[in-house]
Image (cartoon, helix red, strand yellow):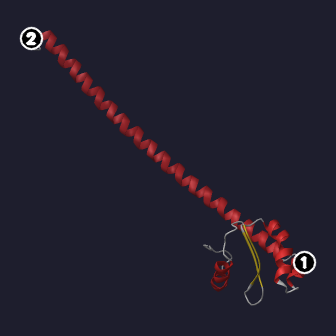
Amino acid sequence: MLRVPTSLRTRFLLSLVVMLALLTMGVLLIVRYRVELHVRQDIGQALQTSVASFRSVQQQREATLERSAALVATLPPLKAVMTSGDPLTIQDASGTFSELAGSQLFVLIDRDGRIVALHASAADLPRGVVQDAIPRYLATGTSSDWWYG
């Protein structure tokens, strides 16, 4: 059985130790809460900055790809290849232009909207999926689109 000291001095000292322990725990809990709140705010701000940076880089990348595609489209050798009208010749000769463009998908279509050359980084991209996506892309009138295949 535990004996509690009965002298006044011991009781006072014991109550002082208990109060100090409670105050210390309270202060530590408040400090912990404030630090946690500050860390959450810092993480949120860093995340917002990171997202803004990513969007900026993505927009710059898209603008660069659009300019690159526009430059490749105006190359006289590519225009000359397209006038041949032979899909096999165009497919064979367009490999160089596909590498020059540096894109994941390089498609050349004739005036009727049919694919005459297709170069994709994904070897298993079905030609039919691309052929079906072309009219939808042309109807939107935008300079970029997402195609799933």
Q: Secondary structure at mark 2?
A: loop
Depth check: 55 or 2 in front? 2
Three-letter amino acid code at the position of disc 2:
Thr
Mark 2 crowd level (few <14, some 14–19, many ≥20, 10 Å Cα) = few
Residue drawn at (44%, 42%), measured in percent from left and top? Answer: 38
Q: Along the horizontal axis of the image, is 146 left or right of 69?
A: left
Image coordinates of residue 122 in percent, x first then y, are: 68, 66
Name the disc covering residue 121, or none. none
Where the N terminus falls, by quadrant? top left
Mark 1 lies on residue: 76
Look at the image and tell me whether residue 141 can be seen: no
Name the disc covering residue 6, or none. 2
Residue drawn at (37%, 34%), measured in percent from left and top? Answer: 31
Vertical order, 131 against 10 (above or below): below
Q: Along the horizontal axis of the image, is 78 left or right of 138?
A: right
Image coordinates of residue 127 in percent, x first then y, are: 69, 78
Reading the chain from its start, which is encountered first: label 1 or label 2? 2
